[in-house]
Amino acid sequence: MPTLSRRQLLLATAAAAAGAARPAGAQALPAEVRIGFQKGAATLVLARRQQVVEQRLKTLGVASVKWVEFSFGPPMLEAMGAGAVDLGSVGDTPPIFAQAGGSPLVYVAATPSSQHAVLVPADSSIRTLADLKGKRIAFGKGSSAHNVAIKALALAGLTLKDVEPLYLSPADATAAFNGGKLDAWVVWDPYYAIAERHYKARVIADTSDKRLASASYFLASRDFATRYPVVLAAVLDEIGKLTRRAGQRREELATVAAEATGIDQKTWEAAFDRAEFSFGPVTPAHVAQQQQLADSFLALGIIPRRIQVADVVWQPPRP
């Protein structure tokens, strides 16, 4: 199975470090590296602010890094598939849709997902997942919340056919939820924390229940990963180091995230208190989990064809 082992990731990092010592003309280099990120991806917000990727890539001879913000995962992967973004981080579901649609992307690293929740208004009569039958439930189509919604309904013996799904971006869902137009909303942090703290949303299920939990992934365009593997390995190395540091300094990270996004610090602290900070290779367990998700979506008629997740896992360079 073509997964990225921890040893291979270390070798890739060594290759990136070795590349820094070579003359710029001795290696293939992009003029610019374009990184997609979401407002909820606080470590990438921090990386952008501290310019750790820029500093590392300058040692390789890459002059520019461009950061491109997206509201959620599917639009980012659409841009990546179209060649407008080189790499970025998304939840577990967008890569399944992208691969099924033939998008030329590869998995390059894994990290825990931010926490998700099934939310209802404070005065709602809905108390359990079973109470969602026949109700209007919002989530981003093709987002990680799409998967959480399906799994949460399944815990109550329901499917999407038993509810009225409304496919809304986080911004649109926020307005609809506050306007009383939704019975429930499935979303991730920091939107989850915002809804709790500012809109008094009530949680009826969340991903602290391991039956609903999943991973997030860094993906890259296949062309970028193939042409610039040393550059890609260097970017991943810096993001990995920053992720681990951030987990040890959560209050500091909340301050940075608040300044960068305009979302108040207490909301970020609530999100980070329940977050897991780790970063590493795509393991066989990740591949199996993604394959199970893809097979489930195929059986439900959500994707049009069977895919093999293992076919799109990046192999790092050897030094």
Image (tube, rainbow, N blue to C red):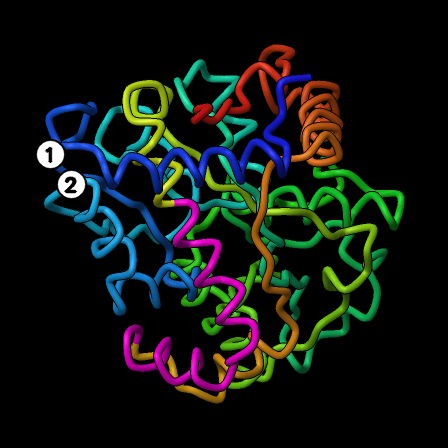
Determine which residue is flagged by label 1.
31
Crowding at mark 1 (Cα within 10 Å: few <14, some 14-19, many 20+): few
Badge 2 vs badge 1, beta-carbon distance below 8 Å: yes
Residue occupying the point 21% across, 54% down? 54
Write down the quadrant of residue 301 in the picture. top right
Determine which residue is flagged by label 2.
62
The residue positioned farthest toward the bottom in the image shown = 266
Q: Residue 255 carries which label?
A: none
The residue positioned farthest toward the top in the image shown = 305
Residue occupying the point 24% across, 62% down? 51
Q: Which amino acid does label 1 sit on?
A: Ala
Q: What residue type is labelled 2?
A: Val
Expressed as whole percent of the image width and height from the top left, the position of residue 53 reads 28, 53
Q: Single out the mark in the foreground, 2 or 1.
A: 2
Q: SS of the residue at dot 2?
A: loop
246 inside magenta stretch: yes
- Predominant SS along the magenta part: helix
